[in-house]
Image (tube, helix red, strand yellow):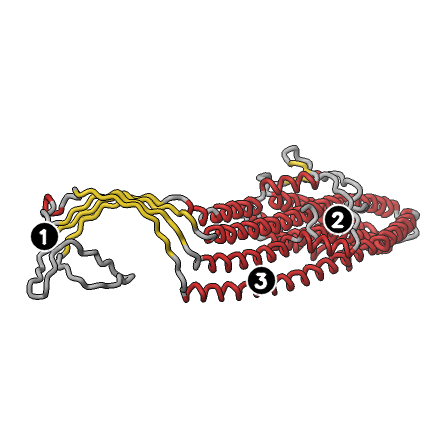
Amino acid sequence: MLWGHVLETAFIRLGIFAACAKTAWHARCLSARRMRDALLLIALASVGASAPRVALADEPAPTPESSSSAATRTMTLADALAYARAHQPAIRSALAQVEAERAQADVPRGQWLPTFGVTAELLGATANNTTASYITPWFMDVPRIGGTRARDAASASFAPYASTFAGVGLTQELFDFGRIAAQSAAADALVDVSKSDAEVVRLDIDFGVEEAFFAERAAKAVAIASDDAYERARVHRDLAQAGVSSGLRSPIELTRAEADLQRFDIERIRAKGGVQVAQTVLAAAIGAPDQRVDTASAPSPAELPSLDAAISRAVAHDPNLIAVMARLKARELATRAVRAELRPDLSLTGTLSGRAGGAPPTSGDSADYSGLLPSVPNWDAGLVFNWPLFDGTIDARISAARAQEAVARDEIDVTRQALVARVEQAYVAVDVARDTLPGLQHAVAAAVANYAQADARFKAGLGTSVELADAEALRTDAEIQLAMGVFELARARAAFGRIIAEGI
């Protein structure tokens, strides 16, 4: 029958998911989006398993035997959200990324600190001084030769002489003409981007927790409905058995009732397993070390704001859009920081040193110990002004940064348009889910009345077990549809809250 096929399909999906959930969730390897998909699967599978009697969001469902263990923690939705925000590894990772960006933003400011160093050198080289000028290339070190006799090619000597140098130096930035400030501002903008990304993760985790919470409530209601269905089937089996024993009913009535009873017993066992799986998923969603987490009563879905108000709030608070806008600001500040590299620079320099050279000087005495001991003291202090008037590489980097700005501007428009479309779709989804509930409730009422009539006919000996099974199928299917409608309303409202960034 139709509802039996639905139950069979749902439990097959539930069994597959249970095996995956125990490994994937405890390994913490699912992303937030995959987590939502997994939670939706367990919710649909659990709701499809049988039929709750009441709306999940309004009345607390009694806890089935499988979740009544004293070791199982019980949480309200608010408690689960608060726990996840404090303990979910994904949130901790996002906050750690914010701190990493903040530490990276302090790097440019380090240029204001003095540079202090010590050096000691021992050099062996020839000493054929001349008046030649040269430019030091970047790929080799050319030592300065000074204070020695000038020689021509004929008198040049290839005998090496020792030179030693030891010194302590200090360099301090005095005025950078705004270069460091521009670099710091660009780095600070990346911190804002990281904060918005962390908010995205938090909203995704909140939505995943809400889905897991409502899925656990649905699975619990399914287990209760399965127990009720089993009890009804047991009563009908006993009536059929009494009728067959008294000769008032055909033996086929008893065999049909026995088959229905066994089927409901299997469904009851599976429904209890669905509660355990749902509680395991909820524990993983909030980042709890517990094997399972039970739920207390769930709040009713909040009322919807107007569509215009929802769009305005989403545009003002959506962390994805804020992150894109922050990236544009970071691009603009990065362009400014690159351009600031062409600004002048004024710094203070000072050195205390000792040196000695073993080469014969043009005048005076040679250094003691043939230049192996830096015994000649010197000190220096000065102001150094540098101004790179033109650098082709910097100009190219400025052009590249401006191109990235244009990309970021276009991304803002795309993100805003997609956000508005998502808000509108989520708004309609909540309306549809809410408008569907009255019809589903009326269908359940009619199916229950039909079942009551079939049950009365069966007890009076006027109806057959086949007629009663048809009425049970109609009632069960109606209750399944109502339970799924209740879950879809709760999930659609949670998704709408995620899109408009409620709670931020």
Residue bearing mark 1: 360
Q: Residue at (46%, 51%) from the top-left corner?
A: 180
Residue 204 place in picture, x, y as percent: 63, 51
Q: Which residue is tagged 3? A: 408
Q: Secondary structure at mark 2?
A: helix
10 Å crowding of disc 2: few (<14), some (14-19), many (20+): many
Amino acid type for the residue under numbered disc 3: Ala
**Disc 2 or 3, which lies upstream in sequence?**
2
The N terminus appears in which quarter of the rendering?
bottom right
Mark sitting earlier along the chain (1/3): 1
Q: Residue at x 40, y 44 (%)?
A: 113
Mark nearer the N terminus (1 vs 2): 2
Q: Secondary structure at mark 3?
A: helix
Do the numbered discs 1 and 3 sit on residues whose CB atoms are within 8 Å?
Answer: no
Q: What x and y, as percent, mark residue 96?
A: 52, 45
Q: Which residue is mark 2?
A: 264
Residue 399 falls left or right of residue 279? left
Nearer to me, 346 or 220: 346
408 is higher (above) or lower (below) than 228: below
Please tell me how crowded label 1 is: few (under 14), some (14-19), or many (20+) other residues with Cα within 10 Å: some
Dot 3 alpha-carbon crowd within 10 angstroms: few under 14, some 14 to 19, many 20 or more: many
Where residue 469 sits in the image (x, y, percent)?
83, 54
Q: Most extreme residue toward the top, as rendered?
A: 70
Cα distance, mark 1 to mark 2? 109 Å
Kindly give the residue lying farthest to the left in the view shown. 155
Say whether marks 1 and 2 touch (CB < 8 Å): no
In the rendered image, the residue lying farthest to the front is 363
Q: Amino acid at mark 2?
A: Phe
CA separation, marks 2 and 3?
58 Å
